[in-house]
Amino acid sequence: MLSVTERWKQIHQGASLGLMVVKNVSSLEQYEALQDCKRDLEAVLRATFTSKEELSKSFPISVYSEYYKRYKKTYHVFQQLESIIFKGKSIPDVSPVVESMFMAELKNGLLTAGHEYAALNLPLTLDVATGNETYTLINGKKQAVKPQDMILSDAADIISSIIYGPDLRTCILPDTKDVVFIVYAPVGISRDMVINHFTDIYAYVKLASPEARIDQQHVYA
């Protein structure tokens, strides 16, 4: 399903990418268990971090922040955590599968992208950007990628990058049934962390979609 280029292995030696396919998800209008879990997670996060400095130095936020600093960017999961912990924001209501992914991101700090499986033109390729590539972001904007950033493509186009996130063409929709979760793991993020992160995503998904099942799960390095 996915191949890794030699260029990626050389430039990002020690990094990895996790992939999990979850099938038979549903977008239920009533998912009280997931909503309750969201409120519990918000409370835990607020109790765990007492300052922005403490949050910024925490692991693995610090690992991703170092990666983003190469491109003069701020790790967006750090910004989202700031909003929830220190500004009183709530985890938004989107769809159960997207919320499940976002909740695991907040809990574990690992950068995650979600794609509709049926929209992918397999196989996938994990590569390094030259800086000349462009793709359409989830907001509809055409974006040039940053040189040496990690990029994931299918046979048609780029579907995500670390710095700019997932694309529009393969985004998760309200009627999506099968989902591919991608975890970008720069150097310093272990395989076990990725696997545990997938476990959390799946547990959250199951709260709203009891019939969901894992079809594939791999960590590529």
Image (tube, helix red, strand yellow):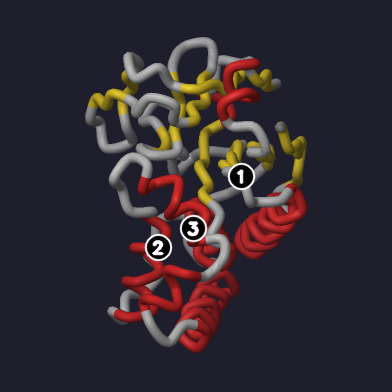
Looking at the image, which is closer to me, 133 or 39? 133
Q: Which residue is mark 1?
A: 187
Q: Are marks 3 and 1 in contact (CB under 8 Å)?
A: no
Left or right: residue 132 versus residue 156 is left
Q: Residue furthest left?
A: 141
Screen quadrant of the C terminus? top right
The earlier-in-sequence mark between 2 and 1 is 2
Picture quadrant where residue 218 is located: top right
Q: Position of residue 28 (x, y in %)?
A: 53, 57
Numbered mark located on residue 78 in the image: 2
Distance (Cα) linking label 2 and label 1: 18 Å
Crowdedness near tag 1: few (<14), some (14–19) or many (≥20) residues, C-alpha within 10 Å: some
Q: Secondary structure at mark 2?
A: helix
Inspect the image, locate mark 3, and give the three-letter code of the amino acid beneath it.
Answer: Phe
Between circles 2 and 1, the one closer to the viewer is 1
The earlier-in-sequence mark between 2 and 3 is 2
> Height in image: 23 above or below 95?
above
Q: Which residue is mark 3?
A: 102
Q: Residue furthest top?
A: 155
Q: Position of residue 150 (x, y in %)?
A: 49, 30
Q: Secondary structure at mark 3?
A: helix
Q: Position of residue 23 (x, y in %)?
A: 68, 39
- The residue located at (34%, 22%) in the rendering is 135
- The residue located at (67%, 56%) in the rendering is 197
The earlier-in-sequence mark between 3 and 1 is 3
- The residue located at (33%, 40%) in the rendering is 71
Looking at the image, which is closer to me, 191 or 173? 191
> Height in image: 125 above or below 41?
above
